[in-house]
Amino acid sequence: MEKYLPLSPEEFNELNGFISTLGSYLPENKAHYVWSKYNRLRATNEPQPCTCGSSGAHWKRAIDFLTDWVNQRK
């Protein structure tokens, strides 16, 4: 469906499922997934920050963006 572009419906469902499981902690093994989707949906190539506490604002920005993006397409 076009409303999910640039994601396929399957990728959208995967992202939606992932977003729904997130709490206040981003598992380190999901950092690349989050950042790659964040860059892809914004059509950018911003370098991935480290997963240390000092980069928390970057990760919050990415998660907030992904959450809003998914919610707008439900």
Image (cartoon, rainbow, N blue to C red):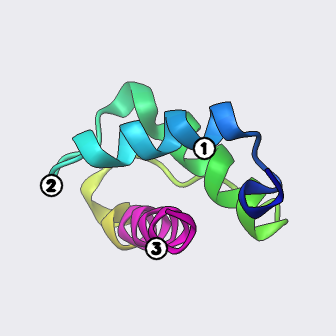
CA gap, disc 2 and disc 1:
22 Å
7 with respect to 56 (left or right): right
User: Earlier along the polypeptide chain: callout 1 or callout 3?
Assistant: 1
Query: What element does badge 2 sit on?
Result: loop
- Residue pointed to by mark 3: 68
Q: Quadrant of residue 27?
A: top left
Q: Which SS type dominates the magenta stretch?
A: helix
Instruction: Say what amino acid the circle numbered 1 marks.
Output: Phe
Q: Are marks 1 and 3 in contact (CB under 8 Å)?
A: no
**Depth check: 44 or 65 in front?**
65
Q: Are marks 3 and 2 in contact (CB under 8 Å)?
A: no
Closer to the eye: label 2 or 1: 1
Instruction: Say what amino acid the circle numbered 3 marks.
Output: Asp
User: Earlier along the polypeptide chain: callout 3 or callout 2?
Assistant: 2
CA gap, disc 1 and disc 3:
13 Å
Residue 21 in the image: above or below residue 70: above
Residue 56 in the image: above or below residue 19: below
The magenta-colored residue range is 58-74
Query: What element does badge 1 sit on?
Result: helix
- Residue pointed to by mark 2: 24
Q: Give how far across and how far down residue 10 sits, in percent.
A: 65, 31
Per the image, is 31 magenta?
A: no
Residue at 60 percent of width and 44 percent of height: 12
**Depth check: 14 or 57 in front?**
14
Q: Residues within 10 Å of mark 1 (few under 14, many from 20)?
A: some
Residue 2 in the image: above or below residue 72: above
